[in-house]
Image (cartoon, rainbow, N blue to C red):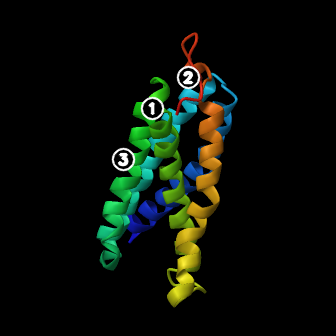
Amino acid sequence: MAGYAALLDTHIIAGTAGLALGPLVAWADARHWRSARELGAWYLGIVVAVGITATGLVIVKRTDLWWLIPVSVLTVTLAVLGRYAYGRPDGWTHAYVHGLGGSYIALLTATVVVAFALDGPLYGPAELIAWLTPTAVIAPLLELWRRKTNGGPVYRSTPGRRSNSC
C-alpha cells in the first residue's frame, strides 16, 4: 500500500501547512500587508490539496467515513468563497473572513477529531468536545479579524461612508 502511504503523507503535510498558513493569512490581512493576497492564494491551494487527499483516503481505506467527502467539498467551497470575496467592496467582508475562517475551522476540527475522537481517548458524548471546541475558540477570533479587515486597503471605504458598515 505504498500509494496509500504517499496519499496519507501528502494529506498530513498539506494539512499541517494549512494549519500553519491560515493564521498567517489572517495576521497579514489584518495588518494590511501586501503579501496577504499571495498567502491567501497559497492557503486556497493547500485546502484544495487537503480536500482531494481526504477524499482519496476515504475511498481507498476508510469507506465507513464516506460522510467526510461532503465535508471536504464544503471546506473547499468555503475557502473558494473567501478567495472570491477577497478585494470586493465592504459588503463582502463577512464572506471573505468567514469563508476562509470557516475552512480553517474545518481543518482544525478534523485534526482535533482525528487526534482525540476517532479511535482516541474521547468516546460517546465526550466526543462533542473535539467537534465543538475549534468553532467555539475560532469564531470569536474571526469576528475580531473581520473588524480589523474592514476598512483596510482591501476594503477601501468611499469618502463620507463608515468603514465598518458590515
Q: Is residue 111 above or below residue 35?
A: below
Q: Amino acid at mark 1?
A: Trp
Between marks 2 and 1 in the image, the one whose residue lies nearer the viewer: 1
Q: Residue at x 65, y 49 (%)?
A: 141
Q: CA distance from mark 1 to mark 3?
A: 16 Å
Question: Looking at the image, is 146 positioned above or below residue 31?
Answer: below
Q: Are marks 2 and 3 in contact (CB under 8 Å)?
A: no
Q: Secondary structure at mark 3?
A: helix
Image location of residue 103, percent across then percent down: 48, 51
Q: Is residue 26 left or right of residue 92?
A: right
Return the disc, 2 or 3, that comes first in the chain's sequence.
3
Kindly state the secondary structure of the residue where label 2 is placed: helix
Check disc 1 and report the residue beneath it: 92
Rendered position, 124 above or below 116: below
Q: CA distance from mark 2 to mark 3?
A: 21 Å
| Residue labelled with disc 2 | 154
Say which quarter of the image contains residue 130: bottom right
Q: Which residue is mark 3?
A: 77
Q: Nearer the viewer, mark 2 or mark 3?
A: 2
* Residue 116: image location, x then y, percent: 59, 78
Q: Callout 1: helix, strand or loop?
A: helix
* CA gap, disc 2 and disc 1: 11 Å
Which of 148 and 108 lies nearest the eye of the viewer?
148
| Label placed on residue 6 | none
**Residue at coordinates 44% horizontally, 54% vertically from top-left?**
50
Hey, which quadrant is residue 121 in on the image? bottom right
Report x, y in % for residue 96.
48, 37
Please name which of the two marks, 1 or 3, marks the residue nearer to the observer.
Answer: 1
Amino acid carrying mark 2 in the image = Val
Q: Give amino acid for label 3.
A: Thr
